[in-house]
Image (cartoon, rainbow, N blue to C red):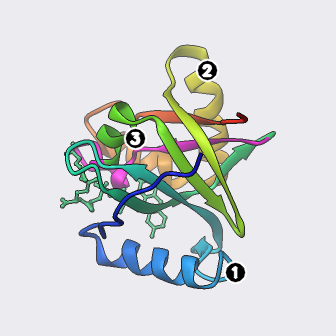
């Protein structure tokens, strides 16, 4: 069941502009960052209830995706972290394919497995983890198949 609501642009212009390009070309353009693939995730704002769309690095394995709340190693979580905690039903578009997913924050061995997969995709996450004085949260997005 796709998400419905009013799209409210984020305040990171560079990211919102990448969403614009990605969506206007149905994922054919704006689908990379420094040559590495990205996806666009739509979540429901924890406070606004509006739709929030953000580009994230593409970390995929057998139809499931991880999203990494790194925010470039900032000391605080990105606000989308709180959206997923409040509203775990998200949409993810990978190139031209958009599906519904349930987001679950990972811990322990499961988190380690997906952290390795994330770093293999985007090695900068290692630097971000050193810089941030917090444990960078990972969510696993599992397809909703109803
Ligand atoms: N960010 C990552 O954290 N990880 C990545 O792997 C990543 C990859 C990436 C690739 C390409 C690209 O262009 C950007 C990339 N980013 C990545 C940046 C990412 O797209 C986001 O810009 C960044 O993570 C910050 O997300 P944010 O949710 O903190 O957005 C900020 C900029 C924002 O828009 N804030 C709004 C504001 O008004 O301050 C609020 C947004 C929001 O969701 N508000 C909630 C609501 O209710 O609507 C309330 C949330 C709450 O409870 O406070």
Label 3: element kind:
helix
Label 2: element kind:
helix
Q: Earlier in the sequence, mark 1 or mark 3?
A: 1
Snapshot quadrant of residue 114: top right
Mark carried by residue 28: 1
Badge 1: few (under 14), some or many (20 or more) residues near its Cα, within 10 Å? Answer: some
Horizontal and vertical percent position of residue 53: 42, 62
Distance between the alpha carbons at the discs numbered 3 and 2: 17 Å
Q: Earlier in the sequence, mark 1 or mark 2?
A: 1
Horizontal and vertical percent position of residue 84: 39, 38
Snapshot quadrant of residue 76: top left
Left or right of 108 in this view: 7: left
Label 1: element kind:
loop
Question: Is the shortest distance between ligand 1 and the CB of mark 1 under 8 Å?
Answer: no
Does any portion of residue 120 appear in the rendered image? yes
Snapshot quadrant of residue 83: top left
Which region is colored magenta? 63-79
Q: Quadrant of the N terminus?
A: top right
Horizontal and vertical percent position of residue 115: 58, 35
Relative vertical location of residue 23 with respect to residue 47 in this rendering, above or below: below
Residue found at x 45% / y 34%: 88
Q: Nearer the viewer, mark 1 or mark 3?
A: 1
């Amino acid at each position: 069941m796709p998400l419905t609501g009013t799209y409210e642009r984020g305040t990171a212009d560079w990211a919102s502009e990448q969403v614009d390009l990605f969506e206007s070309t149905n994922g054919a353009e704006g689908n990379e960052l420094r040559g590495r693939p990205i996806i666009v995730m739509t979540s429901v704002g924890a406070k606004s209830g509006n739709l929030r769309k953000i580009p994230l690095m593409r970390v995929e394995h057998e139809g499931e995706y991880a999203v990494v709340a790194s925010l470039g190693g900032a000391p605080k979580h990105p606000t989308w972290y709180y959206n997923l905690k409040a509203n775990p039903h998200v949409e993810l578009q990978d190139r031209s394919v958009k599906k519904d997913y349930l987001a679950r924050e990972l811990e322990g061995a499961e988190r380690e497995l997906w952290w390795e997969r994330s770093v293999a995709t985007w090695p900068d996450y290692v630097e971000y983890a050193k810089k941030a004085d917090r444990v960078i949260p990972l969510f696993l997005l599992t397809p909703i198949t109803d």
